[in-house]
Amino acid sequence: MTDDTETDDTDGQTDDGEPRADGAGIVAPDGETPTWRERKERAQGLPRLTYEYFERARREDQDLRMESDYVERDVLAFPAWPHEMVRNLALTSFFVGILVFLAAALPPHIGAPANPNQTPAIILPDWYLYWSFGLLKLGPLNPELTLLGGSKLLADRTYGVIANLAVVGAIAIVPFLNKGSARRPVEQPFWAAVGVFGVTFAFTIAAYSAKNLVPITPQLLFDLTFLLPFVAGFISYAVFKSMREGYMFELNRRYYRLRPPK
């Protein structure tokens, strides 16, 4: 025979038959009671911890919403173990499983060995370094000084290295300039536009680095590399700016119960 303690831990209920409020044990979802087979499958290991984590999070969130008059940004603090560890382990296992499946089902193609006696026609780094490789090709922006007889003060490769340092420095200084607490782009349109500008510029400069493979004339591609980021930044700023007033009113109305304008 099982005592009352074991029954309470298994069913997630108190002696009166009510669901446990502390989140301990397995709590059945609303309108659904797990079968004996499901309980046995969740009896140990990662499935049980994952199930208890999501059920406890759901129940505590539900209790908080029932006790609160208004809820907009409830932040529930869970301990690192087992809640955060179980969630991170479940997500990590999922993505590792996808990578293993792709590696087994779609192995990468191994091409012919390189010829050390012949220089390839197109030399490109790995795809995630295209943007940096594109900055090394900014020779047209390197000014030719008349005082030096039309020659350049810096070599094109040195100019490209300085451009890499400037871009990386700009990215590194942004967190120190933007110290706001915004959680959505619409709350700070300017910095959202800066982010859109940076992402667009990363794509355009990456395309410029592989200009030999892009079916556009080099001059037009060079112009689009610096024009499209500004266009995308201005459009995103205008869109977020137009949405901000209505968004902030709706947010304040939920927080402070403001009456809508007549």
Image: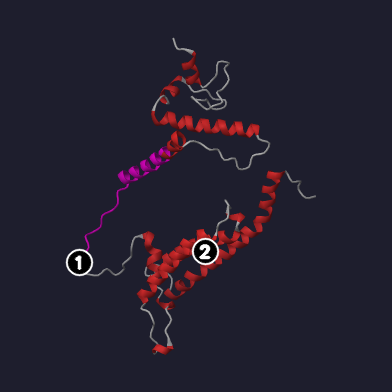
| Residue that numbered label 2 is attached to | 197
For label 1, the SS is loop
Kindly indicate the quadrant of the structure image that contains residue 145: bottom left
Residue 212: % across, % down = 37, 70
Q: Are marks 1 and 2 in contact (CB under 8 Å)?
A: no
Q: Dot 1 corresponds to which residue?
A: 116
Given this view, does label 1 or label 2 mark the residue nearer the observer? 2
- Residue beneath the point at 55% across and 57% down: 179
How many residues crowd mark 1 within 10 Å: few (<14), some (14–19), many (20+)?
few
Judge left or right: residue 128 versus residue 119: right
Task: Report the number of numbered marks.
Answer: 2
SS at mark 2 in the image: helix
Residue 255 on the magenta segment: no
In the image, what residue type sits under mark 1? Answer: Pro
- Seen at 58% across and 65% down, the residue is 234
In this rendering, the answer to whether 186 lies above or below 32 is below
The chosen color scheme is secondary structure
Q: Amino acid at mark 2?
A: Phe
* Mark 1 vs mark 2, CA separation in Å: 41 Å
In the rendered image, the quadrant that contains the N terminus is top left
Instruction: Indicate the position of residue 233 as horizontal and vertical percent values.
Output: 56, 64
Q: Is 70 on the left or on the right of 160, as rendered?
A: right
Residue 175 higher or lower than 157, as above or below: above
Q: Which residues are magenta?
A: 89-116
- Given the current orientation, which residue lies at the most extreme top position? 1
Q: Find out whether residue 97 is within the magenta segment.
A: yes
Q: In the figure, residue 124 lies in which quadrant?
A: bottom left
How far from the left and from the top, in percent, is residue 69? 68, 36
Is residue 210 in view? no
Q: Which mark is residue 179?
A: none
Image spot of residue 239 (x, y percent): 62, 59
**Which residue occupies the foreground of this view, 90 or 226?**
90
